[in-house]
Amino acid sequence: MPAIPAFLQRLLPAAEPEPPSPFFTLEEIGRLHRAGADADTALDDQTWHDLLLESWEERLAQGSSIFGRQMLHRRLRAGLDDQDCAGLTGRLRGLLDDPARLDALTKALRPLRHAETEVAGLLFGGPEYALPAAPAWTRFLWVLPLLLLLSLGLLVTQPLGWMATIAALAPLMALQIRYSRRIEAWNNTLDSLQALLAGSHALAALGGPLLEPFVAARTEAVRLHARLSRPLVMRMIPGAEAYLNWFAAHNIGRYWKTTRAVGDARAFLRACYLRSADLDADAALARHLRTQPLWCWAERTPPRILELRGGVHPLMAQPTPLTVSLGGQGAFISGQNASGKSTLLRMVGLNLVAARAFGFCYAEAARLPALPVRASMQNEDSLLGGESLYMSELRRARELLDASRRTPGICLIDEVFRGTNHLESVSAAAAVLETLCTRDLVLVSSHNLVLARILAGKLDAFRIDTTGGAPVLKPGVLRDPNGIALLATQGFGAQIEDRAAEVARWLSSHLAEPPERPDLNVA
């Protein structure tokens, strides 16, 4: 195809610039979720960090606005009930089956991406986000510019008229100093609300059955957009608004006028927000699924049925599919060092979260329960908090037990109670895990292999087998740990390797596995 001459290129319309990609903190992204979160069923902060969900959420939210991102975050943390999940699945199927419609919807959602300030707190937050009431003196703001005009007349006709001008300017300057930061922040909020209204108008223009609510609300959106906009004259005349702000307190009056307008229209803005955020989140998920080489729709199962066939972790460059199948009991997972036990738990956890929030998984097939997921994988010493590793593990174990008593869920635990000696670690872990298993579906990995025998009545034993190269999850307990063998790979030398093997043989002869599981009667 021949190149377009330069003079013709200048006549063509310029391409629409890519909307900005402002940075939002996790606290800002989570405000919609926190406005109505149920602490008993939502993912807690440690589970969020242990499963590395922030990085995955970043990938899901590519090309979405702060509105869509906040909705994605709420779905991830809170999950969806059966009816809402079925509705989302139907919408995603429709978008995936009609790529042209998805592209058109993505284009109509572009105005939302111009929002650089989140407004979920303003629209859905508690009393701390309440809009201030206008003070009584705002009714007399018109007097200040009038007094300034009169003082200018005195300045021309009277020798000491300058004193009157200064007296008239003083309250105007004081108002600007007092309200400058508040108005700047409010103007950013107004820009985000205007982006929301502009996006609603664009979606209404697109039309279609899915967008009928936007069509019905178009007139109200246009009316509110006009109320919140700067006057046309101010936008057309350079510098006019700045002069009016300083010499007529125009921005002060507009601040109180628009806060009142937003307060009056809060119910409408909430509905507009939820409709737009839902669509933006749906479009982001559909675009994401179009790029994934392996995924499936997830079937919901009873609480203790978990079947994940060929599951992978979407953040891994070349993941090895693994199959996990539990039919009533939890799992005790053993494996050599660096065999992938933690990765397996994170893969299962992420797919459980995805199935509960979105109805799909990264697997060949999946049947998973829609239960709250709770993890304990990255406990550590806290130098600033004065908390040791063991105290951190105990605190987290208590949180898991308390949550289990309130709402049954799924627990993912990696290397329980590493922060104390071997005997007390096994004893405490056995007691805690057996109690958790009475209500939760528990998946735990540990190098303390004796736990597999102690908990045989509660947890099925699995081992990660890497003898064939790629890891495979098989029934049974690891028989050939490689902790001492790895000394040779790190160059410790034959003397240390031989001594370690000698001590290991001695310990094995004195700490043999118990002949039978101790009787731990847990209520």
Image (tube, rainbow, N blue to C red):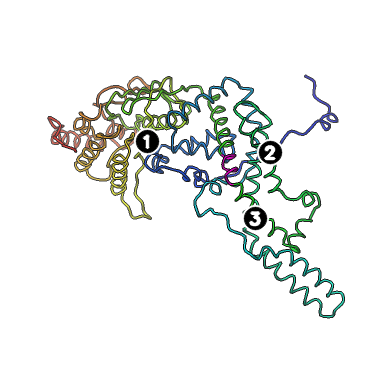
Q: Is residue 268 magenta?
A: yes
Quarter of the image that includes the C terminus: top left
Q: Amino acid at mark 3?
A: Glu
Relative height, residue 271 to residue 9 (above, below): below
The residue drawn where x is 64% and y is 34% is 216
Q: Is residue 201 magenta?
A: no
First-in-chain label (3 vs 1) = 3
Q: Is residue 488 left or right of residue 95?
A: left
First-in-chain label (2 vs 3) = 3
Q: Amino acid at mark 1?
A: Val
Q: Nearer the viewer, residue 70 or 82?
A: 82
- Residue 115 numbered tag: none
- Residue 184 numbered tag: 3
Residue tagged 2: 219
Pointer 1: residues within 10 angstroms few (<14), some, or many (20+)?
many
Q: Nearer the viewer, residue 378 or 25?
A: 25
Task: Give the residues drawn in magenta, as a range.
Answer: 266-273
Q: Nearer the viewer, mark 1 or mark 2?
A: 2
List x then y, in percent, for residue 374: 36, 38
List x then y, in percent, for residue 236: 80, 49
Residue tagged 1: 373
Q: Amino acid at mark 2?
A: Thr
Q: Quadrant of residue 221?
A: top right
Q: Nearer the viewer, mark 2 or mark 3?
A: 2
